[in-house]
Amino acid sequence: MNIQKVIDRTKLDEKVPSMPWYVQQFIDYKLPDLSPSTLLEYVRDYETFFNWLRAEGLSLSEDNRHIKLEELETLRMEDVTGFRLYLTTRREGTNSRITVSRKLSSLRSLFHYLSQIAEDENFYPLLKRNIMAKIENKRIHKPKDTAAKLKGKILEEDELIEFISYIHEGYALDVADNKQALFAHGLNSERDACIVSLILNSGLRVSEVVNLNVDDLDLGNKMLHVYRKGNNDETFKSPVYFRNQAKDDLEHYIALRPHRYHVPKKEKALFVAIRNGQKEGSRMTKRAIQAMIIKYAKRFGKPFLTVHKLRHSFATDYYLQNDIYKTKEQLGHASTETTEVYAHLTDKTMSQAIERRNDSSD
C-alpha cells in the first residue's frame, strides 16, 4: 500500500467508530472497491451531514454515532434543500458547486446501499424510504467548461522550460536580499527543479510524486513505476515514461541526494527534505510540494500555478504531439472523457499560434 493510502487508512480507522453502525457496515462493504482516501472523504461528508441534522433538530441523538435509520427515512425534500443551502451559504467553509455535488453524491451512495443492498434479519431493506433518490445527479464540470477555466492559467510552449530554469537560477536573483530564502534555495534548488521538471515532463499527480521511491526510477529507459490513482491492486505499479529533460534533472538530483540531505539507508523515498529539528532527510509531504510550487510560481509571475496546473501544462503540451488515447494512458485517466479537456485547450492554443504567426508575417 502506498504512503498516502496508509496515512488515510489510519485516519479512516480513527473516524469510523464515531459513525452509526450502518455507516460502518457501508464502509466495510465498500472497502474492497474504493481507496481509503475516497472512503475517508465519504466519512467526512457524513460527519458534516450528521452534525447538521442534529443542529437543525432533525435528529434527537446526542452524537452522530446514535443517529437512527428512522430519522433518515423521515427526511423531506425541504430538508435536503436546507442542507444544500447550508453548504453553499455558511459563513465558514463555504463550498463550491463541485464540492456540494460531491457531498450529495456521497450521501446518495450511502442511501442507495441502505435502501437497495443492505438487509435486516427479515431480508427487508435497512432503509424503507430513500429521499436521496429524488436528488438529480447533475454533471457539474464539462470538459469544454474546464478548459475555459484553465485557459491562461497553465504554462504554454517555452514557459515550461522557463519555469524550470527560473527555479534553478532566477529565483536566487529575486531573493538576493533575503538571506533565509537564499539559503533555502541553495539547499533545495536542484531538488525543487527536479520535481517540477518531472511533472512537466511526465504529467504525474502530486500524490504519485510523493509516493515515488528510488527503486521506482529506471533512468536508462526514462521510466518510473508508479501507484496510479484508482488502481486498487496494492502490488501493481504502472510504468510511466518521462521526457529527456527530466532525465538530466533526475541524474543531477540523485547524485546529490544522499549527502545533501543526509539520507539514512532505510529511507526509500526519492524526494526527501530535512524537517526543522531533524538531522536526516525523510520523505517530502504532499503539502510541502504544493507549498514549494506556489512559492516559485508567485515569484515567477504566475501566482495561479499549482501542482495540478503543472500536470495540465504537461498534458496540453503532450496532446499537441499525440492523440487522445496516448494522452489518456500517459496521464492515467480512467476514460477519454476526462482527457477531452486538452482537446479543447489545444484547439485554442493552436488557433492563437496561427494568429501570432499571421501577425508576425504582416
Image (tube, rainbow, N blue to C red):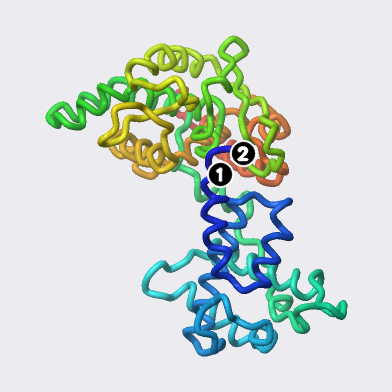
Specify the label residue 240 is tagged with.
none
* Distance of label 1 from label 2 (alpha carbons): 6 Å
301 vs 144, left or right, is left
Name the amino acid type tagged 1: Val
Residue 227 appears left or right of 209: right
Q: Which residue is mark 1?
A: 6
Label 1–label 2 contact, CB within 8 A: yes
- Tell me, yes or no, if residue 357 can be seen here: no
Which residue is pictured at 38% across the width and 44% down the height?
304
Residue identifier under label 2: 1
Tag 2: amino acid: Met
Disc 1 crowd, CA 10 A, few/some/many (<14, 14-19, 20+): few
Q: Earlier in the sequence, mark 1 or mark 2?
A: 2
Q: Residues within 10 Å of mark 2 (few under 14, many from 20)?
A: some
Label 1: state its secondary structure. helix
Q: Quadrant of residue 279?
A: top left
- Residue at 58%, 81% (x, y): give it: 81
Answer above or below: position of 307 versus 76.
Answer: above
**Where does the C terminus fall, quadrant-wise?**
top left
In the structure shown, which secondary structural element does the residue marked by tag 2 occupy?
A: loop
Residue 63 in the image, given as x and y percentages of width and height: 51, 79
Measuring from the top left, give residue 315's x and y in whole percent. Answer: 58, 33
In the current view of this chain or complex, which residue is farthest to the left? 177
Residue 220 drawn above or below residue 269: above
Image quadrant holding the N terminus, namely: top right
User: Residue reaching furthest right?
Assistant: 123
Q: Is residue 98 visible?
A: yes
